[in-house]
Image (spheres, rainbow, N blue to C red):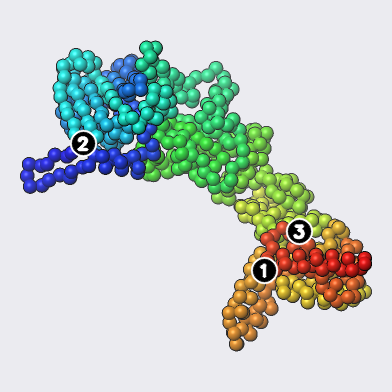
């Protein structure tokens, strides 16, 4: 298959066919199994051209027949066929396709393949390709035989019409010994069903055992069939989704975009998936399976569904295993996104049970959509679940009892204050999860009577009751010892009363405050002289953590009465460590060391006292 030299001084490139096939197998095609898809695709395109010549031919009168008995693989079609001139032009020249011929160039949208290299994929499993064809365009044309070999050579010869009485093409491969995995009869049949189950032309398979050919695509696509009732249709589509994807869909959404000839279904996943994890979708082009991992067909936020679609106008890439990113694909992606939004709207309006089950599983996906979609926001924000001081509940329920909604900026901040805020009657929402803080702040757009504000330490401490003056004075010495012990953590200590009484201490600190203190400390350590003094002064203004001791707690009342300095320091460190653990934030090494040391010191003190 070496390109011939020109008659003049110019010469054409010499192509190493083996090297080209190796390039295709390692960099273009994902697996040698695509050889059968390419042969079936060429057959489908030939049938499409034949129907263009004979539009009055009855549906199903032309088809594709596959044969594999372990020694050969054969694909035969009743398509438009080739003349001897066509063979020389299209099979003997790498990169040229009969689908680019002038007569059908304007119809190229009717064909799946557009790159003219599909036949080369057969060299992935065979060293020789045998093609026998007869043209339907020229009824009296003889049959023509083409043999291509893996070493780059080929032969062409004309045969009597009796060699192929009817128009069409037969491609025969003699598999190499190492290609048995892809050319065994059972595998060929499985691959044919995998790639061609939705083809519109009849396809049969014969394994050479003498039985009748088995249909590869016995039924039309499920969305193209008629059903006695809407319920029967829904059940059939759900069953097809389960067959394809291996799970029972929470619901199925019919997809129909007439402008691009797209039909199919979206199957709502019955289980939660991590945010941003995109599933591949099963995309067919004109019935031929293109890809099982086409992520680009839907927007990123639609990770709660998996789709199987068949389209007319989407363009495949050169490998025909993914979609070409162009304006058509972008428009299809937007249109399918609208279909999913419309499904959510219908569920919200007419099927609250389905909506509830959907939100239980996929609330994060809906939250990611609601952030950027005002319609979904207005429709679903009151129904979305959030973690609050009243437990996991919807904002609609939460807003009924809390006209002022406070939202934290992090999960750890919420965990620090949840119990105390709840006891104080404050309504706090955990805004630390993805999208939650932004969405809660938009609640007044839906519920104007509700106000939303960020929770800060001052808001919380303002709801903690001060102790009386005598109690404060009696505890002054202990508080001074505690402040000195915890100065290394930039932590102040205060005495208050709050519920629940079972909580001995509350550590009020934010991630931003810790970062600011760390930044200030590092800057001070790196600078000296005047700048060091200035930065040191600034460091004093950095927000400090606050350990608030609960006077209602019996343990705290015992601790503040300690008059032994070392024991007072140890007890303050232990209370700080316990409060830090309850906040469930990551502990710094110094804090872990403090917790271990204070525990051992208190244990040693208790043992000495008992002895």
Q: Residues within 10 Å of mark 3 (few under 14, many from 20)?
A: some
Residue that badge 3 annotates: 582
User: Which quarter of the rendered picture does the N terminus lie within?
Assistant: top left
The secondary element bearing badge 1 is classed as helix
Q: How many marks?
A: 3
The residue wearing badge 1 is 513
> Between marks 3 and 2, how big is the CA–CA gap?
74 Å
Residue 281, percent across and down? 48, 37
Q: Which residue is drawn at 93% across and 65% down?
A: 610
The nearer-to-camera label among 1 and 3 is 3
The residue lying at 76 percent from left, 56 percent from top is 418
Nearest the eye: 57 or 248: 248
Q: Please, is residue 435 above or below residue 90 in the view?
A: below
Q: What element carries label 2?
A: loop
Q: According to the image, label 2 marks what residue?
A: 152
In the image: residue 546, left or right of residue 83: right
């Amino acid at each position: 298959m070496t390109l011939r030299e020109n008659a003049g001084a110019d010469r054409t490139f010499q192509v190493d066919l083996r090297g080209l096939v190796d390039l295709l197998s390692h960099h273009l095609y994902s697996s040698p199994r695509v050889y059968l898809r390419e042969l079936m695709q060429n057959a489908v395109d030939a049938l499409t051209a034949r129907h263009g010549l004979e539009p009055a031919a009855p549906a199903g009168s032309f088809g594709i027949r596959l044969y594999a008995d372990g020694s050969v693989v054969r694909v035969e079609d009743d398509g438009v066929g080739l003349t001897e001139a066509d063979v020389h032009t299209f099979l003997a020249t790498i990169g040229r396709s009969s689908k680019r011929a002038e007569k059908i160039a304007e119809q190229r949208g009717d064909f799946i393949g557009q790159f003219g290299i599909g036949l080369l994929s057969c060299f992935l499993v065979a060293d020789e390709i045998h093609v026998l064809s007869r043209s339907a365009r020229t009824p009296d044309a003889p049959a023509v035989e083409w043999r291509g070999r893996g070493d780059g050579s080929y032969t062409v010869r004309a045969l009597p019409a009796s060699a192929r009485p009817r128009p069409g093409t037969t491609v025969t491969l003699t598999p190499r010994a190492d290609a048995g995995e892809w050319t065994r009869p059972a595998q060929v049949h499985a691959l044919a069903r995998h790639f061609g189950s939705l083809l519109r032309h009849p396809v049969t398979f014969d394994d050479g055992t003498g039985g009748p050919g088995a249909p590869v695509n016995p039924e039309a696509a499920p969305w193209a069939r008629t059903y006695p009732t809407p319920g029967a249709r829904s059940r059939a589509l759900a069953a097809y989704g389960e067959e394809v994807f291996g799970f029972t869909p929470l619901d199925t959404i019919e997809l129909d975009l007439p402008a691009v000839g797209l039909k199919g279904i979206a199957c709502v996943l019955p289980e939660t998936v991590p945010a941003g994890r995109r599933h591949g979708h099963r995309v067919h082009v004109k019935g031929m399976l293109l890809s099982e991992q086409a992520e680009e067909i839907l927007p990123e936020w639609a990770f709660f569904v998996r789709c199987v679609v068949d389209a007319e106008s989407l363009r495949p890439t050169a490998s025909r295993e993914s979609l070409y990113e162009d304006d058509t694909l972008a428009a299809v992606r937007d249109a399918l996104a609208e279909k999913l939004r419309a499904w959510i709207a219908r569920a919200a309006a007419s099927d609250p049970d389905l909506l509830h089950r959907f939100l239980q599983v996929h609330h994060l996906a809906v939250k990611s959509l609601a952030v950027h979609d005002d319609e979904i926001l207005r429709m679903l924000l009151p129904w979305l679940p959030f973690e609050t001081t009243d437990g996991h509940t919807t904002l609609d329920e939460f807003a009924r009892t809390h006209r002022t909604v406070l939202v934290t900026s992090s999960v750890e901040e919420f965990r620090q204050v949840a119990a105390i805020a709840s006891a104080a009657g404050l309504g706090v929402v955990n805004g630390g999860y993805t999208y939650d803080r932004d969405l809660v702040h938009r609640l007044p757009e839906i519920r104007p009577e509700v106000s939303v504000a960020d929770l800060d330490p001052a808001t919380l401490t303002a709801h903690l009751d001060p102790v009386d003056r005598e109690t404060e004075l009696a505890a002054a010495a202990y508080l001074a010892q505690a402040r000195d012990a915890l100065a290394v953590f930039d932590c102040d200590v205060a005495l208050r009363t709050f519920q629940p009484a079972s909580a001995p201490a509350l550590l009020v600190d934010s991630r931003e405050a810790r970062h600011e203190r760390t930044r200030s400390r590092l800057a001070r350590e790196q600078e000296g002289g005047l700048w060091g003094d200035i930065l040191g002064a600034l460091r004093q203004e950095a927000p400090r953590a606050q350990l608030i001791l609960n006077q209602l707690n019996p343990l705290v009342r015992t601790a503040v009465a300690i008059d032994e300095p070392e024991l007072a320091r140890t007890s303050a460190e232990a209370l700080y460590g316990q409060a830090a653990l309850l906040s469930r934030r990551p502990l710094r090494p110094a804090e872990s060391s403090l917790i271990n040391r204070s525990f051992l010191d208190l244990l040693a003190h208790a043992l000495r006292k008992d002895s």
